[in-house]
Amino acid sequence: MEMKMPFNVWVLTLAQAFAMSAAPMMMLLGGIIGAEIAPSPILATLPIASMVVGVAIFILPVTQLMRRFGRKKVFIGGSVVAGVAGLVAAYAVQEQSFELFCFSGILLGSAGAVIQQYRFAAMESVAPELGAKATSRVLLGGLVAAFLGPELAVLGGDLIEIPYVGAFLFLTMVSLLAGLTLCFYREDSSALSRVNIEALGDIRPLKSILNQEQIWVAIAGAMIGFAMMSFVMTATPLHMHHIEHHSLADIKWVIQSHIIAMYLPSLFTGYLVAKFGVSKMMLAGMLAYFVTVVTALMGHDVFNYWAALVLLGLGWNLLFVGGTVLLPRCYRPNERFKVQAFNDTLVFGSQAIASLSAGWVIHQLGWQVLLIICIPFIGIQLILISWWKLNQSKLLYHSE
């Protein structure tokens, strides 16, 4: 019989539903507002990119703060920062200040760096064999966010006389609700309470930990998954609205469907990873990404964008869950903060580069080139998985 998920997993799932609502609001509105108030069209996606850069910059400080003060205090603090980011964004839109709007994106990204630790906290709350299911359960909170965030963005768009100000006030509201939920998170009195301390051994140098094929499969899977998702998703609203002249309602539907596709598979991803293994799920994610590119290249109708972004969300889920589940197999429990910080710095650093470059690429090179750029990265992940499985086969052969 399947074991029930601990209370902490449910708290983190609900907090994820509120906290993650902020990201799709910025994804939907950031490029559109940026195009209206940026000094150059090339900088239109910079507010979204600023959010991603904020995640990358603050991953390491966040993990260090958690090591010192525990997860709960930092979780709640991250929610408060997100609430402040919403107020700053609302004021920036009112004053038509592009610089301040980008700063609000960085603040929101710093809170996002905290949210990214929810999945590790969930995995640490369960037995190792339930890690994939705990990760998937927490990611399900994003499914609620996929509905809530865009709906609040559209509802708040005209709530106040100045367009979009109300949307960012809603962002503050949901962020503070996440903080209230996290007050019920039960901090483990010992970060390693369920582990035999004597069996942990010394903390290895990072270089030694990285001397494993599978850790690079885990890191690269999440890196490529996030970078390609951010690269295509950041450019989509801008291309649809300002180049193809699709309506905001159509764009909302595409982005909303994309975010649903990112998190809805979490209903069964944990089960599939446990049944078929990490590598097969990652391969399925890469296939979804390849079909994304082909679909988006086939036309500029709303359906093409919708189908491509749904496949993009599915591919992200398979790669991100796979990488998250595989990573803890590569380190000892007392090495977790070091490796998690290194992993997330690379993952969200690559996402920041992809997001920052999306606006420039789409304006200078076009939508088709932006999509074709993704293909070599799909090939890189396929090579890494093949390298890992080949070495596994060799080790198995020699052991026999």
Image (tube, rainbow, N blue to C red):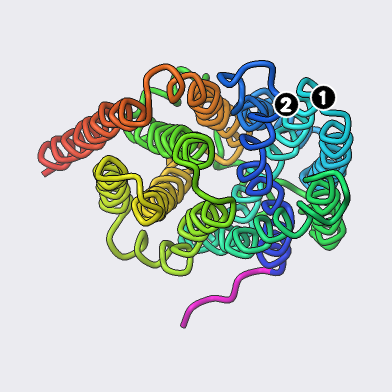
Q: Is 112 drawn above or below residue 143 in the view shown?
A: above
Q: Would you call the spot at circle 1 few (<14 residues within 10 Å), some (14-19), or many (20 or more)?
A: some
Q: Amino acid at mark 1?
A: Ser
All told, the count of numbered labels is 2
Q: Is residue 363 above or below residue 394?
A: above
Q: Say which residue label 1 marks.
A: 97
Query: Does dot 2 land on a helix, a strand or a loop?
Result: helix
Q: Which residue is mark 2?
A: 37
Q: Position of residue 389 (x, y in %)?
A: 20, 39
| Residue 147 vertical placement versus 346 (above, below) | below
Residue 187 spot, x, y in % from top left: 79, 54
What residue lies at 26% left-to-right and 31% top-to-bottom? 375
- In the picture, which quadrant includes the C terminus? top left
Q: Could you say which quadrant of the image residue 70 lies in?
A: top right
Q: Nearer the viewer, residue 339 or 190?
A: 339
Task: State yes or no: discs 1 and 2 in contact (Cβ < 8 Å).
Answer: yes
Q: Is residue 384 magenta?
A: no
> Marks 1 and 2, Cα distance to the nearest angstrom?
7 Å
Question: Majority secondary structure of the magenta segment?
Answer: loop
Check disc 1 and report its element: helix, strand or loop. Answer: loop
Whole-percent x, y for residue 219 in the image? 43, 33
The residue segment tinted magenta is 1-6
Where residue 43 sits: x, y (%)? 61, 20
- Looking at the picture, tell me which residue is in the foreground, 162 or 383: 162
